[in-house]
Image (cartoon, helix red, strand yellow):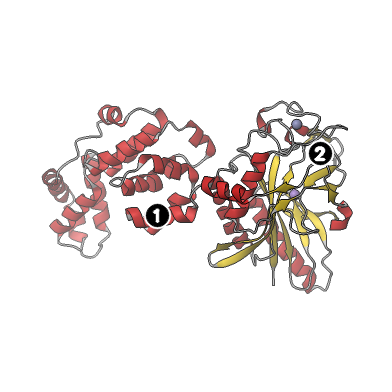
Amino acid sequence: MIKIGLEIHCQLTNLASKLFCSCKANYREFESNTNICPVCIGLPGSLPMLNRRAVEKATMISMALNCKTPEKIAFFRKNYFYPDLPKNFQITQYDVYGHTSIGHEGKITIEGKEIRIRRIQIEEDPGRLIYEGSSEKTQITLVDYNRAGTPLVEIVTEPDFENPKQVRLFLNILVDLLSNLGVSDPSLEGALRADGNVSVKGGNKVEIKNVASFHDLEKALHFEITRQQSLVERGIPVISETRQWDDKRKITVSARTKEEEQDYRYFLEGDIPWVKLSPEHFNQLKKEMPESIASKRDRYITKYGIPEQVAEVLSSDKYYTDLFEQAHNEKNAKEIANIITTDLMGFVDTREKREKSKLTHHHLSDLANAIISNKITRSSAKTALLNMVQTGKPLASIITEQDLGNVLDESKISLIINEVLQEESNAVAEIKEKPETVNYLVGKIMKKTKGKADPAKTLDILKKKLGVE
Ligand code: ZN
Ligand code: MN
């Protein structure tokens, strides 16, 4: 029996300032150690001031993960020494003296399996250590405190995962959920980080830290399960410890024996008063919460008749749903969903491509309307779409420039089909034994019409002429 639990750190990247001072939450654009102040580097006498928006965003996450929320929240000092932690303690939340973290006992369901959320807490990110030099002997460690104090939400699950695949599904859903909430941009490096803990039957719990990506976490979990199972089989005890993922060697290595909770000497952060969360706080946030992914999906299916799978893909990505929401009306919704999920997703599948893309929602609605009114075929529409993504030109000028208009009517398609059937008489003769020859013929016809015939219509006419189903 395998048990896996997760600790996910999510930076609230959409906030303007850090958790306890007015330095920028977006530390990425600064020279090293220039986005800092006495508060976030912990100079004596400096006082933290809690960022109200951070509490609001964390509350939203807590509600979206179906957590219970307390009436009052408190902050604690978690004491440990590490060079990236300038105060020698991290301000975080702690549930041991009652529920005072922003959320507890939540759940989300993945493919029918319920994953329980133990706790959600607000805390500050430490600074960043940068290693330079190639070998262990020549390596120097540099510290950049720009990140210190960045608002984080830590999400801790119960050990409810039975295999790494469930972990991957969960993280995918969580990433979509956080980005849909508008609290974090998962495509930013380091915005979302996950640590895992694993135990197998007859062993002890082992934590895996320092994993650069979700993909690596999955590999690390696989490795760890195999390692622990083989120890147990040979009667060697599995030590409870923290291990690091070594990306070069693709193995986990022992980092340190695990600290116990008591080693951190948690105590109340006296510089931050308890924060009362009023019913108005929750009511206001409920109003501000964006529509959930599940509700968008259901609306796309029932209101516009968009096929379930298309709706599923469309609703999960905020970038596409934002485009869709702005572009669609009752009549063209289905066509726009179709354009996004069949063609657009291939053109703007990375952060860089999305940032470069010149496509607006006007382009999308124009394109869908042109397809519906038969001004352009779907295959020409794909060409036009790529052009709009790259150049941002209006559809009308692209159609003229590239000669994409003048969709052929049925009689013209019929004439071209007749030509092709004559030229391809050998293929036609084979049609009874090899039904897939039909596709070959459609290809020939499409080539001859330069994409100006509607493929579905063409196939219909062709099948009638050939007398096949
Ligand atoms: Zn600061
Ligand atoms: Mn943490």
Point out residue 212 in the picture as x, y percentages from the top left corner: 69, 46
Instruction: Report whether the residue tagged 1 is closer than 8 Å to ligand 2.
Output: no
Query: Front-most of 288 and 132?
Result: 288
Task: Report helix, strand or loop for mark 2.
Answer: loop
Q: Whole-percent x and y of residue 66? A: 59, 59
| Number of numbered discs | 2
Amino acid type at image mark 1: Arg
Q: Nearer the viewer, residue 36 or 353?
A: 36
> Quick one: label 2 or label 1, which is nearer the N terminus?
2
Label 1, secondary structure: give it.
helix
Amino acid bearing label 2: Asp
Rendered-image quadrant of the N terminus? bottom right
Q: Is residue 105 above or below residue 16?
A: below
Mark 2 burial class by Cα count in 10 Å: few <14, some 14-19, many 20+: many
> Residue 71 got which mark?
none
Mark 2 vs mark 1, foreground winner is: 1
Question: Is 74 left, or right, of 379 in this rendering?
Answer: right
The residue wearing badge 2 is: 84
Asked whether the viewer can see residue 190, the reply is no
Residue in the foreground of this view, choosing between 463 and 174: 174
Image x and y of residue 75, in percent = 77, 47
Which residue is at 66% across, 51% downward? 216
- In space, the residues marked 2 and 1 are separated at their CA atoms by 46 Å
**Dividing the image into 4 quarters, which one contains the C terminus?**
bottom left
Q: Which residue is mark 1?
A: 299
Name the quadrant containing residue 326.
top left
Q: Residues within 10 Å of mark 1 (few under 14, many from 20)?
A: some
> Percent position (x, y) of residue 363?
35, 34
Q: Residue at x 37, y 48 (%)?
A: 337
